[in-house]
Image: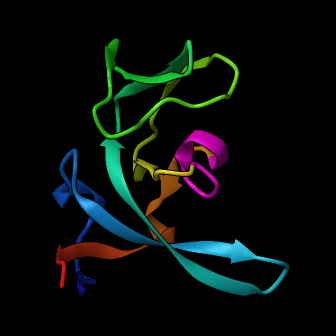
Amino acid sequence: YSLDRDTKISQLQIGDAVCYRVAVGESAQSNGFGFVAALPGDTVSLAKGMLQVNGAPSKYSGPTNLADSGPLMVPQNHVYVVTSTHLTDSVVKGPLPAAALRGRIAEFP
C-alpha cells in the first residue's frame, strides 16, 4: 500500500482508509488500518449494535455486539475510525487523535 504521511485531519473525508498507531503493551506500537467513519464535529452513537453518525447508520461499520452508547461528539483534531473487528478502532478506543494518525492510505496493491 502507499501511505500519504502528510495528510492532516482537515484533509480527510468519510470513507478514507487510514493507518494509525496502536499501543501494544506498555512501550511497543503496531499499525492499525481502518476507515474514517466520522470527522471533527460529527456525533456518533451505537444503537442496537449499529454505528450511527449524525443520526444515520454508518456504511463503514457492520453490526457489533457492544452495548448502546453515546451520543459522543468527535473532538477537534480527532477522527472516528472503524475496522471490521472493532478491536482497536474508535468504537472500542474512542476518537483517534491526530498524533496517532500515520497517514491516509493513498493506494492499495
In the image, 40 versus 63, the foreground residue is 63
Residue that lies at the very extreme toward the right in this rendered image: 26
Residue 73 x %, y %: 47, 27
Residue located 47% across and 51% down the image: 84
Name above or below for residue 102 compared with residue 15: below
**At x 32% / y 76%, what residue is drawn?**
103
Say which quarter of the image contains residue 17. Answer: bottom left
User: Residue 9's spot in the image, x, y percent?
Assistant: 29, 59
Q: Is residue 93 above or below residue 97?
A: above
In the rendered image, residue 44, in percent from the top left (x then y), is placed at 45, 25
| Above or below, comparing residue 76 to residue 69 in the picture | below
Q: Nearer the viewer, residue 92 or 108?
A: 108
Q: The C terminus appears in which quarter of the rendering? A: bottom left
Look at the image and tell me in which quarter the N terminus lies. bottom left
User: Does the stretch in magenta take in 104?
Assistant: no
The magenta stretch spans which residues?
Answer: 86-93
